[in-house]
């Protein structure tokens, strides 16, 4: 159904959708907690480290935006990751006021381990579906993602 369809969505469908989404979100939070414990990183540090996947450098401002936290919170996260030897802060050659944050080799190895673990966890979930079901699931999730992004622009 699209927005132009004049069929009213029953309240029970909306309630079931909300319930399922909340369950998925809770499962994701629990999975992140499991990962935090497995890799001995507080949740916020783990999420911060994950932002460097595919990135050579990030600024504190970019991290704050991606993590949806105040820059002061990012400063504390970065300081903790620098102390643990996972990040390094370098001056930006183009602007001495800006610090570029980058993974150390130890941080890169840890991120690779975390990424490998996450990939395998997703594989385990997908293995529980037949090939046809996987195709339907991935298509449905793609549509859901797209519609969720447009819905946030509609609801004010």
Image: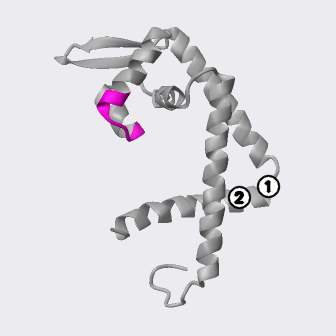
Report crowding for label 1: few under 14, some 14 to 19, many 20 or more residues within 10 A (C-alpha): few
* Magenta region: 67-73
Left or right side of 102 for 91: left
Establish if 5 lies above or below 76.
below
Q: Is residue 56 visible?
A: no
Q: Nearer the viewer, residue 77 or 66?
A: 77
Q: Is residue 89 visible?
A: yes
Label 2: which residue?
Answer: 135
Asked whether residue 139 is drawn in magenta, I would say no
Label 1: which residue?
Answer: 131
Report crowding for label 2: few under 14, some 14 to 19, many 20 or more residues within 10 A (C-alpha): few
Q: Residue at x 37, y 32 (%)?
A: 63
Q: Nearer the viewer, residue 91 or 20?
A: 20
Quadrant of the frame with the N terminus: bottom right
Q: Nearer the viewer, residue 93 or 39?
A: 39
Q: Residue at x 46, y 16 (%)?
A: 81
Q: Position of residue 121 (x, y in %)?
A: 72, 37
Q: Position of residue 124 (x, y in %)?
A: 78, 41
Secondary structure of the residue carrying tag 2 is helix
Left or right side of 148 for 132: right
Establish if 15 lies above or below 28.
below
Q: CA distance from mark 2 to mark 1?
A: 6 Å
Residue 29 — which label? none
Establish if 33 lies above or below 88.
below
Q: How is the image coloured?
A: one colour
Number of numbered discs visible in the structure rendering: 2
Q: Residue at x 49, y 9 (%)?
A: 85
Q: Residue at x 61, y 58 (%)?
A: 22
Q: Cβ–Cβ below 8 Å for labels 2 and 1?
A: yes
Secondary structure of the residue carrying tag 1 is helix
């Amino acid at each position: 159904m699209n927005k132009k369809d004049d069929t009213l969505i029953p309240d029970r469908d909306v309630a079931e959708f909300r319930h399922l989404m909340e369950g998925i979100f809770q499962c994701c939070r629990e999975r992140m907690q499991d990962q935090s414990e497995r890799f001995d990183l507080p949740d916020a540090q783990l999420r911060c480290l994950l932002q460097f996947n595919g990135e050579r450098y990030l600024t504190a401002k970019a991290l704050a935006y991606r993590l949806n936290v105040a820059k002061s919170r990012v400063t504390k996260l970065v300081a903790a990751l620098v102390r643990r030897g996972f990040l390094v802060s370098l001056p930006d050659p183009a602007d001495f006021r800006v610090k570029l944050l980058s993974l150390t080799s130890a941080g890169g190895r840890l991120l690779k381990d975390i990424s490998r673990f996450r990939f395998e966890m997703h594989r385990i979930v997908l293995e529980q579906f037949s090939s046809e079901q996987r195709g339907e699931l991935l298509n449905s999730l793609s549509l859901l993602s797209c519609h969720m992004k447009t819905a946030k622009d509609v609801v004010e």
